[in-house]
Amino acid sequence: MSDIQAYGLWPLVIINSLIIIIFAFSFTRPKTSRDWRSFGGFAAFIIALFTEMYGFPLTIYLLSGWLASRYPEIDLLSHDAGHLSYTLLGLSGDPHLGLLHLVSSIFILGGLFLLTTSWKALYTAQKNHALATTGPYAYVRHPQYDAFTLIMIGFLIQWPTILTLIMFPILVWMYKRLARSEEKEVLAEFPEEYSSYMAKVPGFIPRLG
């Protein structure tokens, strides 16, 4: 890819952002202000990511002096140079065919799959006015937040930027607070049943074995 084609591709920024955001929206269906906060934070992460991936490489620009001195052979304005994790580890070849890209794709696809299966279980439970305890909810209490986190980790492995690295821990912290707020509401509605469920099923990290 030539330098001219590497960045400034704003239609790609818009199209790629919309694909991920619309997909996530279709399986989260935010209703409350809390739902919109969690979804909005994820959407902001995705927009920031693709803006640097195809629009303007802010991270490359800010680190250009250090990168140019440490990796003089690399064309910093090329698309491949944006795969900073690949560059910093001293890997060679096409980053799209490397192990890091494969691992990132597993995280992203796994997160998208978890998001869809979680929504199906939650939708069925809400339709029956019951607790969601099947599917991914049998292993963790907040699989949808786990799904958002997995997708973000996958993109950070593939295309780390200063802004998304700052946003990631803030969003994880926000999801944890939102999850605690949700649990208080569900406990008020299903006190005994949800207390028993909480005692058996962890919040975010499934138990092994």
Image (spheres, helix red, strand yellow):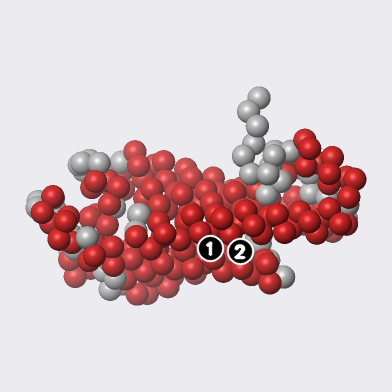
Identity, as a three-letter code, of the amino acid under mark 2: Ser
Secondary-structure class at tag 1: helix
Which residue is tagged 1? 42
Placement of 133 over or under 151, stated as above or below: above
Left or right: where 84 falls relative to 180? left
Q: Position of residue 60 (x, y in %)?
A: 24, 62
Task: Tell me the residue at 63%/44% (across/down).
Answer: 204
Q: How many marks?
A: 2
Q: Nearer the viewer, residue 90 or 163?
A: 163
Placement of 146 over or under 18, stated as above or below: above
Left or right: where 145 falls relative to 153? right
Quadrant where the C terminus sits is top right
Left or right: where 130 falls relative to 198? right
Q: Which mark is residue 9?
A: none
Which residue is tagged 2? 38
Q: Taking the image as drawn, is residue 29 in sight?
A: yes
Disc 1 + disc 2, Cβ < 8 Å: yes
Quadrant of residue 159 within the rendered picture: bottom left
Q: Position of residue 23 (x, y in %)?
A: 57, 62
Q: Position of residue 79 (x, y in %)?
A: 25, 59
